[in-house]
Image (cartoon, helix red, strand yellow):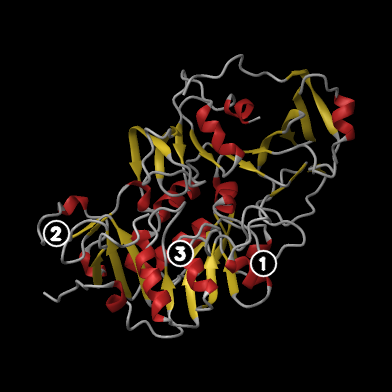
Amino acid sequence: MKNKIYRTFDEAVADVPDGSVFMSPGFGGVGIPRNLLAAVNRQGAKGLTGISNNAGTVDAKVDVGTLVAAGQVKKMCCAFTATPHPSQVTAFVRMYNNGEVDAELIPQGTLAERIRAAAAGIGAFYTPASVGTELAEGKEHREIDGKVYVLEYPLHADYAFIRAWKADTFGNLQFRLTQRNFNPIMAMAARITIVEVENDIVPVGELDPDQVHVPGVYVDRLVRIPPDGIWD
Amino acid sequence: MCDRLAMEFQDGWIVNLGVGMPTLCSNYVDPRKSLIFHSENGAIGYGPLASAETADRYLVNAGGQQVTAVPGMAIVHHADSFGLIRKGMVDVTVMGAYEVAENGDFANWRVPGRKGGGIGGAMDLAACAKRVFVALEHTTREGEPRLLKRCTLPITAPGVVKLVVTDLGLFELTPQGFKLREHAPGWTLDEIQALTGARLSAADDLREFRLRASREPR
């Protein structure tokens, strides 16, 4: 069996080239791969396209916004391109308003389904979300059984950075409570999936197959978060 | 205000609460009703906001606030969570808004003069939930009405709002527009009409806000 375990986050992201498309999960501050994002920040890849629910928050923690602030990101695909209140100005909002970073604003359910479509080999799908709004303008519409839908395409990525609760050496993953959020669909959608793991990576066979959230076949690299890593 | 909307929830409903004021609805529910609170990040059947003792940093609601688990809760990933929404299983979603129009349109994702916006799950929920309730201040800080004939801001979904609560009243959306069902203490229909950008009608049984005498303990 191919060894998927990397000693450091820096080794795990060393080959991420300029211009890559990456996925970064997390919702409400939970399930964010902060250690891997910090490593990509140190590694310095530029011209990245990010797929994530938001583009960073006002807190000082490492997230997608760290890469945006460092000028490593050229475009974000996300459900928020503004903060809830105008007084909250993130690096992304400042740079987006100045035209230094591009963005595609996507309804959150459409974002999730576009990721799942990439994970599931679906060529496109129709959704009722955004019909009748300016976000649906220019998109193909279709009426099916009396209801109007818009056509949406999958979002593919070169890399997914994932935060998991438990893993085995084959890369079978488990998440805890709402840490799950975008993690499984992104882990299954990307070409190369890199995971930071909160608990000791256990030998194959120790995880109950019925309790696996992401099968190891989707996972390429694993790093156990060290005691001095980013935990929250 | 959210207390008043929460009183409309029926036993057994799946309820999705928007970020901000609406999340407070999960604290003020009638213990005689069994409600299932759903949040976009995949918690189906969570409980009230957590205290310092009950908080678990792995369990948050749509606003990122730590909430409590209740027996029977289930967790799904984000795509399945929105599958539940698009299938139409959410009985009611409660959201904030900048504007609501008499045709049921509402706007809550972009403000004038700002590039970009914050959609989150609002468009999916608004398009697919069985009922959309909106809670908002009756006027802007400048005193301009937020209840209008037509929205001036880009809308979140067309024709979906069923019930609106403001600091001045409870309004039902009917084919004839806003119908005032309850008013804040001391306010008349004419006074509320003067601060509203669309024509109001009065319910036959128009009365003062019906609010619970005391809040249920958490």
Of all residues, the one furthest to the front in this rendering is A228
Identity of the residue drawn at 67% across and 58% down: A133
Identity of the residue drawn at 39% across and 85% down: A17
Image-based side of B134 in relation to A62, left or right: right
Q: Are tags 3 and 1 found on a single chain?
A: yes
Residue where numbered disc 1 is placed: A137
Where is B139 relative to A118, above or below? above
Q: Which label sits on residue A202?
A: 2
Q: Are tags 3 and 2 found on a single chain?
A: yes
Where is A2 relative to B133, above or below? below
In three-dimensional space, the C-alpha distance between marks 1 and 2, rounded to whole angstroms, equals 49 Å
Sooner in the amino-acid sequence: mark 3 or mark 2: 3
Q: Chain of mark 1?
A: A
Closer to the camera, B62 or B54?
A: B54
The spot of residue A16 in percent (x, y) is 37, 81
In three-dimensional space, the C-alpha distance between marks 3 and 1, rounded to whole angstroms, equals 31 Å
Asked if disc 3 and disc 1 are in contact, CB closer than 8 Å, the reply is no
The crowd level at tag 2 (other Cα within 10 Å; few <14, some 14-19, many 20+) is some
Give the residue type at disc 2: Val
Sooner in the amino-acid sequence: mark 3 or mark 1: 3
The spot of residue B14 in percent (x, y) is 47, 35
Give the residue type at disc 1: Glu
Q: Are tags 1 and 2 found on a single chain?
A: yes
- Disc 1, SS: loop
Question: Is residue A120 at least partly visible in the picture?
Answer: no
Where is B175 relative to A86, above or below? above
Image-based side of B199 in relation to A75, left or right: right
Closer to the camera, B172 or A195?
A: A195
Image-based side of A104 in relation to A60, left or right: right
Q: Chain of mark 2?
A: A
- Disc 2, SS: loop
